[in-house]
Image: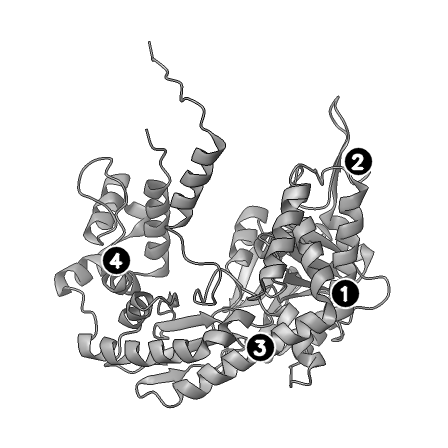
Amino acid sequence: MTRTTSTPPSTPAEVRERLAHLQAQDLPVHSGRTLAYVYDSGLEEVDRVAREAVAAFAGSNGLDPTAFPSLLQMENDLVAAGLRLLGAPDGAVGTVTSGGTESCLLAVQSARDSRPDVTGPRMVLPDTAHPAFHKAAHYFGVEMVVVPTGDDHRADPGAMTAAIDDRTVLVVLSAPSYAHGVVDPVPAVAAAAAERGVRCHVDACIGGWVLGYAARLGHDVPPWSFSVDGVTSVSVDLHKYGYAPKGTSLLLHRTSAHRRPQLFSSARWPGYTMLNSTLQSTKSGGPLAGAWSVVQLLGDAGYEQLTAQALEATDRVVAAVGELAGLRVVAPPDATLLVLGTDDDLDPFTLCDEMAARGWHVQPQLSYAGAPATVHLSFSAATLAHVDELVAALTASVTAARTFGPVRVDPEVAAVIAALDPAGLGDADLDALLVAAGLAGGGAGDEIALPERMAEVNAMLDLATPEMREALMIAFLDRLSRPSR
């Protein structure tokens, strides 16, 4: 017989203390020093108003818009703001989702379901498209036709056009792509898709809010939005450069007919008739209210100012990189994402570790399809106030990383990694690899142990095939997500 134990209740003070202790282990979400995952306006008032709105509407449920008309009104207001910014025509519609991935998933699902006549539907996407579309392909049974990008890291219009066939239900482009920060040639590809009667989705999750306001500020922005004929849907996140709380995104459609296949209803059971506009049924009104409040508070003038700050921070770091030997800009950024390449004597993974040691979180990107590993930085409005500190940290980190030298993986370990077949690995094999990578202890059931410096781990992963990386990351997540006893 299993004996169960009960935990005593905690006082409010104890709960707050525990939360503060847990949060102290996280990356900072303010101060502009975390250059991935979070986007900071630098305005305390924005955060305060957002938190108040999230708390006020945390118990409201977006499942039934007739029961909570306040949520419906806020959603319509946010969609209207997005449609105005993106130059959408009359009759355009949209939906607030939980984040960019859900927006991308729904773009694929609605394209697939709009063509019930197609057996074995396909979507055409450049190799720089976000993995959310890979997930959508996996979930919805849509075959991916992945087209290599050109030397400028943008989609190749000729190759994308040639890949469209009678089974294609969707073409995907990025504005900008996450990995390189550049906008794909939307007009040429969208026109080719339209000529074949195929939907064209622009994934502007990370850059759409910035690009829209950058154009208003007079910046030279490549055409990418609904102003381009043939673009049928666009995804743009509010919890990135809309500076709203996690997680809110917009999926916008050129017409209601384009959105209709996204909507789901079921009356085939004895309960209430289910009606959903997203993958979720129950959804808290908190994030929606938080996003609405931030958009109302900032208005166009506020976003123009924040966009100008983020772009200036980007430009200043780009200029500084030009003065640092061994470091280069991989692609001139179209928005606020900067990707850095390194010379052979400057290890990118060690550079990331050195930046972390100086209080700056930047993101390593592993090598892919013959392209070397890089370093990724996403700048927010809050970065501008600290850009001199960032440049100083980057300069010192380059010097330290060059002194430290490139990370070398033991040749025997490298040979083992190269010979592994991820399809044939069992749990014991994967656990052993996690131990070898320094991500887990050697005992059965040992907890994940993250090293302070990740360069050696990343160097080992960099030698693995994408399939092996995926297998290792799934094993890592499985080991990481175990309940404490």
Query: Of the residues shown, which amino acid type is indicated by label 1?
Result: Leu
Height in image: 345 above or below 373?
Answer: below
Height in image: 457 above or below 230?
Answer: above
Q: Earlier in the sequence, mark 4 or mark 2?
A: 2
Q: Which-is-in-front pick, marks 2 and 1?
A: 2
The residue wearing badge 1 is: 83
CB atoms of marks 3 and 2 within 8 Å: no
Does residue 352 appear in this view?
yes
Q: Is residue 77 left or right of residue 482?
A: right
Q: Does dot 2 land on a helix, a strand or a loop?
A: loop
Distance CA(mark 1)–CA(mark 3): 23 Å
Distance CA(mark 4)–CA(mark 2): 49 Å
The residue wearing badge 2 is: 67
Residue 95: which disc?
none
Instruction: Tell me which corner region of the image, top left, top right, bottom left or bottom right, holds residue 323.
Output: bottom left
Residue pictured at 29% horizontal, 60% vertical: 461
Q: Which-is-in-front pick, marks 3 and 2?
A: 3
Q: How far from the left and from the top, in percent, is residue 383? A: 49, 72
Query: Which is more toward the observer, 225 or 423?
Result: 225
Query: Of the residues shown, which amino acid type is indicated by label 3?
Result: Gln
Query: Of the residues shown, which amino acid type is indicated by label 2?
Result: Ala
The residue wearing badge 4 is: 452
Label 1: how many Cα within 10 Å (few below 14, some 14–19, many 20+): many
The C terminus lies in which quarter of the figure?
A: top left
Instruction: Tell me which corner region of the image, top left, top right, bottom left or bottom right, holds residue 405.
Output: bottom left
